[in-house]
Image: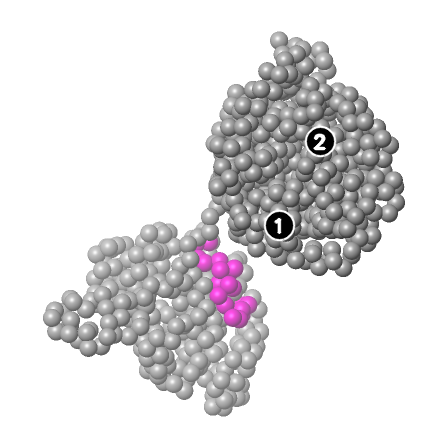
């Protein structure tokens, strides 16, 4: 039935989500018109319980989201982009910030920028603070910055990141339910996913409705101040109708033509008004206060982040903080999607800094200028307590901005400008909200039929008008009660989104590998070591007398060698310069080694060392024979190194076991031959397994010998009698040239004649050997002659 109705109306959306959301909105609007007392009584009862009994949940949740966002930005995941890895931002920084500010906070600051600091200045909530004192003024700015700074924007951060990640990284529909894909899987399209989207859409309508209602009350108050128009519900309803109508026009125009242009205009006008108040007032005093309030806010932030007014039974926290957080979180689905849409292509770190940091800095400036100006007027002779009387004693908070402007020059002009700014802020809220709600209901970002966006814009105006016109003089209180009830489940949903987002990031990016460190042996004092040695031969097996680490536990990037006693002893008697030759099969290492030997180096062949440590009669020989049998044994009983190499190439487990057994012996024999060569020699060693063994730090210079694969295959076929297929398999099984290049200091390319090869060797000799061992220059010259 819903599908048929959907098609008849010419819609292009998900019928169940659209019609159920619309039905709930219509039901509420009708109920407010038919049974206003009962509906308001229900919302009032539930709201009181949430405010004063469960207010701690709102306080904890928002602080947790701020900590989560900052931690994510500082982590390695901060480099992830909202979108594909190669995506770029669509909007410039100025346009981006303008749309952020207009959609998320501008209207709120216009309403509360004067009213909130004055309230806390006259009725300070912090324990022991005297009203109207300097301390009360400082704390009032701290609290105002707290309510509209990092924490308010922290509520938008998690939904924004979740929308951005799941919509543009995982390419899921632009819906709140998509953020629960790690938990629900395909269930995001099922009943649970649809219920989540319906709740998000309804909450967004109510959140925007409350905001527009506050704006209508403030616009009505400004008109009262400037033109004497009375404060009345029907006038506010007319204002709502006008704002909604203009919002509809912007909705029809679309994102770039509507929201973007209005945001540009409004941010310029708002800043112009701010600068006017700064310049027309006590400028230097405001500048001092601005800097001081920033530091004071940061100092007070840890306390305010967890403040619940415990000794006041949570009344202040429930009236202020809980209301703000519940109100803001109903905006979170809409602002989150909107912010994600305009932030596509930016990194998580840029997103957090931009969305959390930049607006918070603007809030501190805004609150300092408006709040301090209000304090000065309230303290000045002739206007003393005038702001307090209107805002606090009479409760006329919507008049706060206009009463402030009345104390500055050009009141009529600035008041009209303020009315225009407030109006445009709420227009941009309606049009951007309608665009986002249409996307959430439809599940795609392409613009659907205009009638869908028109409906969502009208629904915001209808909800707002229903609350305002049926609540009489208690309009503000009614708005607050409704929004707190709606905000509680959305706050819980936002917390869950943080867990879902982190899970998705870990699934896609993986976790960092644990850092591999050297594992050091337990050191005992010399005398205690000897005592235990006398008590039993095994009593000291796990101890040493000097600092020593377990060989084989070196870090992945072994760039710094500890100067242990064992390392120093190992270096004693070693050649003055040790060079390692690495390369693939038939790359030409033997030819390069011969060129170095002709220049005066002592060359050690790796195959000779392997044959020596695996000679018959040794434990290593016996263990190799036991493990692998005749497959690696020559007829004369020795180990067939070629067969052993083939086995290592074809079997990773066998390779690891052979390396574990033989490589320590090879390294020890290499050291022995180095000491035997003497300290005045240059030792060049052909090392077969340097990449796998990770022992490149033992050599002063590592030289990789390379040759094209086809040339290497041709050499193996000619020199060893392999078939061409076997030769290609041998090339493929060895370490790659890229892996060898990563640990090499120099690369010798063996794809020309011998003279070209020797020229490369001579260059390396001149660069490394001659400066280190001048005595061998004679050997070099002799070789050249």
Quarter assignment of residue 82? top right
Residue at 48 percent across and 46 percent down: it is 510
**Which of the pair 212/355 is nearer the observer?**
212
Is residue 514 left or right of 266 when viewed as pictured?
left
Q: Is residue 669 magenta?
A: no
Is residue 662 left or right of 467 when viewed as pictured?
left
Residue labelled with disc 1: 136
Residue at 79 percent across and 24 percent down: it is 235
Range of the magenta residues? 732-750
Q: Among all residues in the image, which is located at the extreme left? A: 535
Q: Is residue 743 magenta?
A: yes
Q: Visible in this render: residue 629? A: yes
**Which of the pair 437/273 is nearer the observer?**
273
Residue at 75 percent across and 20 percent down: it is 451
Percent across and percent down for residue 672 are 31, 77
Percent across and percent down for residue 231 are 78, 27
Instruction: In the rendered structure, find residue 214 and report the number of the disc placed on it.
Output: 2
**Which of the pair 764/292 is nearer the observer?**
292
Q: Visible in this render: residue 727? A: no
Percent across and percent down for residue 427 are 77, 32
Disc 1 is placed on an element classified as helix
**Among the two numbered marks 2 and 1 on one chain, the one whose residue lies closer to the N terminus:** 1
């Amino acid at each position: 039935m819903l599908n048929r109705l959907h098609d008849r109306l010419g819609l292009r959306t998900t019928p169940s989500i659209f019609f159920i959301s619309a039905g709930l909105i219509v039901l509420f609007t009708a109920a407010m018109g038919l049974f206003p007392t009962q509906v308001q009584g229900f919302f009032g009862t539930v709201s009181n319980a949430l405010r004063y009994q469960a207010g701690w949940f709102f306080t904890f949740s928002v602080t947790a989201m701020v900590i989560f966002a900052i931690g994510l930005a500082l982590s390695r995941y901060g480099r992830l982009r909202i979108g594909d890895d190669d995506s770029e931002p669509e909007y410039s920084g100025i346009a981006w910030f303008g749309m952020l500010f207009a959609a998320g906070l501008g209207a709120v600051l216009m309403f509360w920028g004067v009213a909130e600091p004055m309230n806390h200045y006259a009725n300070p909530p912090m324990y022991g603070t005297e009203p109207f004192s300097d301390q009360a003024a400082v704390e009032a700015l701290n609290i105002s910055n707290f309510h509209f700074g990092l924490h308010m924007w922290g509520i938008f951060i998690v939904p924004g990141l979740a929308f951005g990640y799941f919509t543009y990284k995982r390419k899921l529909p632009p819906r709140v339910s998509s953020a629960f894909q790690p938990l629900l899987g395909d269930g995001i399209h099922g009943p649970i996913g649809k219920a989540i989207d319906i709740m998000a859409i309804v909450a967004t309508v109510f959140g925007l409705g409350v905001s527009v209602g506050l704006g209508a009350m403030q616009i009505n108050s400004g008109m009262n101040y400037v033109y004497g128009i009375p404060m009345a519900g029907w006038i506010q309803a007319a204002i709502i109708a006008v704002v909604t109508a203009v919002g509809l026009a912007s909705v029809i125009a679309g994102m770039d033509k509507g929201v973007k242009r209005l945001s540009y205009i409004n941010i310029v006008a708002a800043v112009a008004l701010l600068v006017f108040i700064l310049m027309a007032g006590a400028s230097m005093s405001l500048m001092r206060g601005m800097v001081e309030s920033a530091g004071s806010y940061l100092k007070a932030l840890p306390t305010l982040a967890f403040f619940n007014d415990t000794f006041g039974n949570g009344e202040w926290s429930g009236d202020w903080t809980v209301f703000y957080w519940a109100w803001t979180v109903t905006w979170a689905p809409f602002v989150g999607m909107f912010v994600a849409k305009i932030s596509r292509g930016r990194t998580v770190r840029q997103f957090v800094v931009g969305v959390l940091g930049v607006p918070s800095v603007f809030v501190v400036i805004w609150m300092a200028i408006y709040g301090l100006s209000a304090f000065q007027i309230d303290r000045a002779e002739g206007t003393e307590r005038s702001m307090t009387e209107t805002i606090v004693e009479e409760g006329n908070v919507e008049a706060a901005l206009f009463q402030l402007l009345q104390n500055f020059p050009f009141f009529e002009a600035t008041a009209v400008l303020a009315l225009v700014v407030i109006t445009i802020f709420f227009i941009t809220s309606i049009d951007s909200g309608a665009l986002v709600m249409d996307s959430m209901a439809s599940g795609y970002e392409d613009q659907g039929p205009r009638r869908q966006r028109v409906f969502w814009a009208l629904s915001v105006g209808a909800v707002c008008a229903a609350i305002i016109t049926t609540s009489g003089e208690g309009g503000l209180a009614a708005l607050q009660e409704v929004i707190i009830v709606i905000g509680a489940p959305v706050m819980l949903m936002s917390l869950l989104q943080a867990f879902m987002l982190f899970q998705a990031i870990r699934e896609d990016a993986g976790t960092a590998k644990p850092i591999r460190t050297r594992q050091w042996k337990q050191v005992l004092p010399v005398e205690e070591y000897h005592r235990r040695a006398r008590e039993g031969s095994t009593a000291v097996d796990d101890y040493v007398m000097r600092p020593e680490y377990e060989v084989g536990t070196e870090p992945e990037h072994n760039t710094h060698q500890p100067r242990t006693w064992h390392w120093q002893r190992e270096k004693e008697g070693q050649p003055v310069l040790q060079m390692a030759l690495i390369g693939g099969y038939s790359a030409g290492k033997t030819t390069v080694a011969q060129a170095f030997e002709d220049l005066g180096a002592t060359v050690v062949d790796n195959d000779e060392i392997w044959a020596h440590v695996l000679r018959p009669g040794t434990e290593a020989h016996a263990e190799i024979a036991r493990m692998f049998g005749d497959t690696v044994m020559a007829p004369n009983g020795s180990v067939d190194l070629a067969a052993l190499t083939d086995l290592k190439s074809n079997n990773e487990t066998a390779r690891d076991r052979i390396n574990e057994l033989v490589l320590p012996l090879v390294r020890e024999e290499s050291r022995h031959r180095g000491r035997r060569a003497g300290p005045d020699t240059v030792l060049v060693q052909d090392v077969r397994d340097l990449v796998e063994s990770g022992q490149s730090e033992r050599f002063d210079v590592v030289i990789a010998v390379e040759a094209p694969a086809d040339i290497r295959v041709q050499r193996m076929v000619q020199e060893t009698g392999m078939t061409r297929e076997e030769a290609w398999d041998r090339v493929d099984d060895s370490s790659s040239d890229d892996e060898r290049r990563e640990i090499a200091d120099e690369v010798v390319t063996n794809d020309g004649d011998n003279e070209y090869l020797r020229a490369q060797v001579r260059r390396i000799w001149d660069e490394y050997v001659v400066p280190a061992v001048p005595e061998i220059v004679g050997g070099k010259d002799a070789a050249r002659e």
